[in-house]
């Protein structure tokens, strides 16, 4: 069945519904992901909540969906745009085809769309609201998206503890990826996952050795109300912030964030580590960045920066044992060259030896 993608700037693309069509319109912010593989991880990464994702690699779905690579229990994207979708699954681990998986969750996928043209358009106009529909013509051409706090939709609602390792890490869940939890469990940690709005005193009562501020969807400024808690955590415990967690740590310390025109989403973004004086290839998925000029009075330093556009990719702090990265050291999908960040975090946790410190 024919389907259409309407962009907020009035441009329209024709395609075919590869999934069972939509009865209602699907609205979302349109973004693109440039990795050749990794569609399963992207679909189930909660940071993509309610976005329409364009996969730029021209053949998607050929190795199906397996049991190993889920980043959460369900897909979070609003819709999927591809050039060619493979309806079969050629892999010994495959449990379903991509098509069956999306049908199961009622997520529309439009195929045979000119994805190159869409990406050129997004690169020019920026990521923007878009609609997937069966309708060729639509009456309204400017769509507004719901201004809700997306983190509240994807964060765990209950405390949950995993593993029995030596170091107790509290993972503040803004929409965590499973592989982030795995990275800690593999490093001798016991991890307590807590809802994103858990109060400082409640986290303190868990007697953590360190804190992980996870990735998550939306604009970090939607979470202004929890910045005092984050600042408190940073002042008391070795802390690692990843992606949204990095942005929130920066805001909590007084820095500013801004939105990139079309974000970074893919598996081969070069990042410079000023401390190690080396370049790593990284996995990325974000729209917002920390403004470097706003770091001046925060005690933070931009340890990492992006070699494509010079944007800030991670921070260190002059006093607190705080590390943050904008990229994804847990990878999945993408290269794991940045995974030493987890090792450095555990080193900080070990060096701190369970003390609760409080810097003025
Ligand atoms: N992966 C993430 O944590 C994304 C962070 C934030 N939602 C952004 O788009 O910049």
Image (cartoon, rainbow, N blue to C red):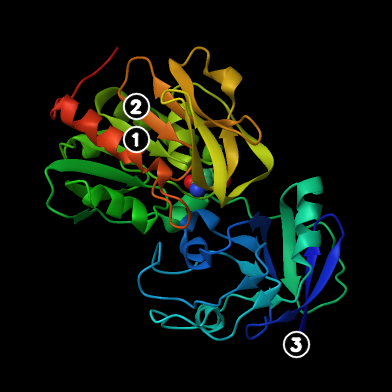
User: Toward the viewer: 333 or 253?
Assistant: 333
Place of residue 107 in the rendered image (x, y in percent of width and height, measured from the top left): 58, 75
Q: Residue at x 82, y 56 (%)?
A: 142
Q: What residue is pinned by disc 1?
A: 240
Q: Is residue 249 left or right of residue 354?
A: right
Callout 1 secondary element: strand
Question: Is label 2 in contact with label 1 (beta carbons under 8 Å)?
Answer: yes
Of the two numbered discs 2 and 1 on the same chain, state the one appearing first in sequence: 1
Q: Residue furthest front?
A: 278
**Residue 144 image point, x, y percent:** 73, 55
Above or below for 77 versus 191: below
The image quadrant that residue 351 belongs to is top left
Q: Quadrant of the N terminus?
A: bottom right
Label 3 belongs to which residue?
1
Q: Looking at the image, can residue 295 be seen?
A: yes
Closer to us: 267 or 263? 267
**Category of crowding for the residue at label 2, using alpha-carbon neighbours closer than 10 angstroms: few (below 14), some (14–19), many (at least 20):** many
Up-down: is 199 above or below 80?
A: above
Q: Residue under label 2, please give it.
A: 322
Query: Which sits earlier in the primary sequence, circle 3 or circle 2?
Result: 3
- Please report the residue visible at 34 percent of the width from the left and 27 percent of the height from the top: 322
Q: Is residue 219 visible?
A: no
Mark 2–mark 1 distance (CA, rounded to whole Å): 6 Å
Q: Considering the numbered disc 3 on the image, is that residue within a helix, a strand or a loop?
A: loop
Q: Quadrant of residue 226?
A: top left
Name which residue lies at 87% across and 59% down.
Answer: 10
Can you tell me whether the CB of the residue at mark 3 lies under 8 Å from the nearest atom of ligand 1? no
Task: Tell which circle, 1 or 3, labels the residue nearer the N-terminal end.
Answer: 3
């Amino acid at each position: 069945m024919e389907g259409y993608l309407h962009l907020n700037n009035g441009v329209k693309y024709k395609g075919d519904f590869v999934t069972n069509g939509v009865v209602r319109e699907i609205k979302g912010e349109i973004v693109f992901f440039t990795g050749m593989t990794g569609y399963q991880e992207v679909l189930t990464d909660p940071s993509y909540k309610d976005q329409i994702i364009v996969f730029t690699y021209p053949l998607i779905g050929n190795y199906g969906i397996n049991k190993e690579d889920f980043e959460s229990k369900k897909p979070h994207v609003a819709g999927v745009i591809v050039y060619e979708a493979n309806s079969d699954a050629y892999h010994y681990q495959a449990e379903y085809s991509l098509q069956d998986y999306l049908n199961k969750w009622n997520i529309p996928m439009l195929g045979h769309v000119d994805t190159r043209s869409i990406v050129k358009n997004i690169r020019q106009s920026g990521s923007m609201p878009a609609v997937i529909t069966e309708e060729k013509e639509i009456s309204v051409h400017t769509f507004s998206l719901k201004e809700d706090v997306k983190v509240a939709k994807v964060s765990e609602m209950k405390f949950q503890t995993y593993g029995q390792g030596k170091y107790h890490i509290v993972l503040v869940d803004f929409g965590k990826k499973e592989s982030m939890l795995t990275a800690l469990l593999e490093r001798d940690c016991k991890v307590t996952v807590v809802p994103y709005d858990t109060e400082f005193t409640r986290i303190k009562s868990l007697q953590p050795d360190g804190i992980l501020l996870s990735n998550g969807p939306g604009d970090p400024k939607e979470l202004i109300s929890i910045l005092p808690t984050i600042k408190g955590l940073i002042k008391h415990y070795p802390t690692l912030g990843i992606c949204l967690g990095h942005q929130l740590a920066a805001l909590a310390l007084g820095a500013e964030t801004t939105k990139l025109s079309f974000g970074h989403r893919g598996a081969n973004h070069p990042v410079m580590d000023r401390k190690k004086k080396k370049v790593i290839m990284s996995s990325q998925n974000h729209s917002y960045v920390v403004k470097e000029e706003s770091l001046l009075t925060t005690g933070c330093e931009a340890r990492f920066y992006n070699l494509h556009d010079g944007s800030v990719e991670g921070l260190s702090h002059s006093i607190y044992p705080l590390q943050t990265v904008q990229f994804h050291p847990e990878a999945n999908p993408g290269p794991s060259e940045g995974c030493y960040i987890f090792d450095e975090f555990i080193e900080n946790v070990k060096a701190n030896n369970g003390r609760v410190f409080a810097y003025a």
